[in-house]
Image (cartoon, rainbow, N blue to C red):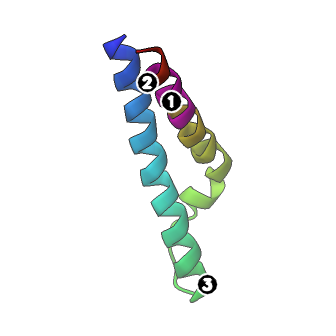
Amino acid sequence: MKSVRTFFSILIIVGIILMIGRILTGILLYFDMSFTKFFTDYSLISFVILIVGVLGELTVRNKV
């Protein structure tokens, strides 16, 4: 059970990093500064990673 909780915690961390990247990309593109489009190209995937991590963490926390 500990490895499952660790997996979901890692998903949350990765999702938050990708969310920060999306916000940073949006801000820089708003000010017409050149920046990578990696975070906007994979925005749906990063959102799904974050949601799966949060839901998994809540599920594991409720079962323990």
Q: For label 1, count other residues whose C-alpha is less than 10 Å away and answer few (under 14), some (14-19) or many (20+).
A: few
Between residue 20 and residue 59, name the one nearer to us.
59
| Viewer-closest of 53 and 41 | 53
Left or right: 45 as drawn, with respect to 62: right
Q: Secondary structure at mark 1?
A: helix
Amino acid carrying label 3: it is Tyr
| SS assignment at label 3 | helix
Q: Quadrant of residue 51?
A: top right
**Disc with the residue nearer the chain's start (1 vs 3):** 3
Residue closest to the far right: 44
Q: Position of residue 30 (x, y in %)?
A: 61, 84
Identify the image quadrant of the N terminus.
top left
Look at 59% across and 79% down and name the residue there.
29
Residue at the bottom extreme of this rendering: 31
Q: Nearer the viewer, residue 60 or 47?
A: 60
Image label count: 3
Q: Quadrant of residue 41?
A: bottom right
| C-alpha gap between disc 2 and disc 1 | 5 Å
Give yes or no for residue 56 being in the magenta stretch. Answer: yes
Please give the label number shown on residue 61.
2
Question: Which residue is labeled 3 in the image?
Answer: 30
Q: Is residue 10 magenta?
A: no
Residue at mark 1: 58
User: Image point 50% across, 30% down: which residue?
Assistant: 58
Could you tell me the amino acid type at mark 1? Leu
User: Badge 3 local density, few (<14 within 10 Å), some, or many (20+)?
Assistant: few
Q: Are marks 2 and 1 in contact (CB under 8 Å)?
A: yes
- Residue at position x 61%, y 46% in the image: 47
What segment carries the magenta color?
A: 54-61
Q: Position of residue 23 (x, y in %)?
A: 53, 68
